[in-house]
Image: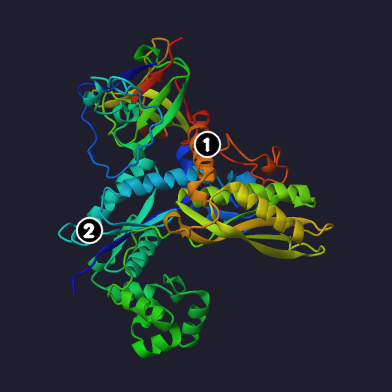
Amino acid sequence: MSIKNNKSKRSIDGTITNIFHYKNHSPLSRPLLGNEVPAGFPSPAQDYIEENLDLNEYLIAHPSATYFVKVEGYSMIDAGIYPEDILIVDRAVEPSHKKIVIAIVDGELTVKRLYNKSGKWFLTPENPEFEPLEITRDINFHIWGVVIYSIHKMR
Amino acid sequence: MAKNTVALVDCNSFYASCEKVFNPHLANKPVGILSNNDGIIVALSDELKQLGISRGNAAFKIDKRLIREHGIKLFSSNYTLYGDMSARVMNTLSMFTPDLEIYSIDEAFLSLTGFEHLNLTDYGRQIKRTVRQHTGLPVSVGIGSTKTLAKIASRFAKKHNFAEGVFDISDHPDKDKILRWVEVEHIWGVGRQYAKMLRRNGITNAYELTQVPDNWLQKKMTIVGLRLVKELRGISCVDLEMDIKPKKEIVSSKSFGSTVTELQDLLEATSDYCSVAVKKLRSENQVASLIIVFLSTNRFKNEPQYANYAKARLPLPSGYTPDFIRAANRILKKIYRPGYKYKKVGVMLADIVHQSKAPLDFFQPTYLDDHRKIIMDCMDDINEKMGSHRIAYASAGIKKPWQMRRKNLTPSYTTSWEHIPVVKAI
């Protein structure tokens, strides 16, 4: 599994930085270093074990605002987003120029890069075979959330 | 006396709004949520209300033409989704206050005492905006010096467009005018009987109620009523309840999807409900020693009627599901009468105590210190990690033909990998 960070360098993060108490169940945590040996000489490393690595902690900043969605279609492959990939969507992050977003266009959830060009906003695909869509007044459009990671299974 | 400030945050048309978050086609469409077995409408969006439909309407009675013309969508209740979205809302709200009382699945009281230096209406707007952004759900925010006033403010915020979903009653120059707008039936804590009694005595709205002398109130509505009126007058009498009280009883019961006549089906359903109830018991670190089983026919149908219940006491409090299934099956065999069409069976656990307070026994091991607890903990662990019905009781049946109908159930968008929403990259 590879984890890609789609965060744009220039963008500013959301305004919400704190979420108090959240109980994190992480069934997939792995120990950082070796464990205690059952018998005999204790591992010299055991004093150095600090904690398990927790993917949730690494990937999810705002648990209550984070959702997972599955991708269908090829229009974002140059951004490293392929069919069947699972996207991590953080709704607490403010959408801005160059962020990859989940948008609602005419009642459908779609993934595209949000782009601002001389005052006009576009939903741009990352595949030359697809056309960008200018966001005009007569399009029923909302931003649903901002994509922060893509989970891609190696095949 | 120190000034209190409380906000009530209330999700608008919560169940219908949850469905709309994951199904954007439904925006601005009339949406209704059906009860267990898809019988009646239990929740509905504003758009559906405007078509003259209200809570409690039978789904089959809605005009088919109306459904077609307005694109009305009716869904089975998806409690997995609503529960998860509720937790997200509550978590988001906890950013805004150290003291939060979760009042129901879609409402919470937030203590804003000490926040008065802020513009509280602005703070309310910020709460509303943040919940909307993080969860996609619309909420109303009512602010007042007591919980009862916050409730009224929230109702006002919902009913008046100019408030844009946020209203601080303390900030209003003419509080009495707002209270006059609230009819007695709509005051939090005034039941139908009290409302009738008040109207008989010429009291029609919240303002008039605040003008009634205390001794009359206490005589007619007990101390509870007096407390309520004091709250209306701005004197805080009902504190926020931050701790979740342990349950005194646990009930698990559902109506069947179709009528059930055979004992075997009833035994399966009872075993199934037992396992749900006892799992809940364990999740709160409790044990129980009394089990009650009840069953009934459909009293709305013109058929031979029968209803009965019986109870059994375990020798010692337990959290071991098979102890309860065995007892429940024994009870059921005793109260079952052949020849009836049953609509419902249920189990109730009572005499519940915390595990640490369970009595010990000189002659036999208690649930806590023998293999039964180890087995249960192990089973709960496996089911938590691998899916809630990975290990289940054979006595609860496999096919479960008696199970309730949920024909229009939407996916568990947020709690199951197979059900997460699909986004189009086309």
Q: Residue furthest right?
A: B339
Looking at the rendered structure, the number of numbered marks drawn on it comes to: 2
The answer to whether any part of residue A134 appears in the image is yes
Give the chain letter at badge 1: B
Mark 1 nearby-residue class (10 Å; few <14, some 14–19, many ≥20)? some
Residue A14 on image: x %, y %: 24, 35
Q: In the image, what residue type sits under mark 1? A: Asn
Which element type, helix, strand or loop, lies under badge 1?
A: helix
* Co-location on one chain, circles 1 and 2: yes
Residue B320 higher or lower than A121, as above or below: below
Q: Earlier in the sequence, mark 1 or mark 2?
A: 2
Would you say B55 lies left or right of A117 here?
A: right
Q: Residue B383: give its label.
A: 1
Residue that mark 2 sits on: B120
Residue B237 higher or lower than B219, as above or below: above
Location of residue A97 by image quarter: top left
Location of residue A136 by image quarter: top left
Q: Residue at x 59, y 59 (%)?
A: B315
Q: Residue furthest left?
A: B117
Residue B115 on image: x %, y %: 19, 58
Q: How is the image coloured?
A: rainbow
Residue B88 on image: x %, y %: 38, 44
Instruction: Say which of marks 1 and 2 sits in front.
Output: 1
Q: In the image, what residue type sits under mark 2? A: Leu
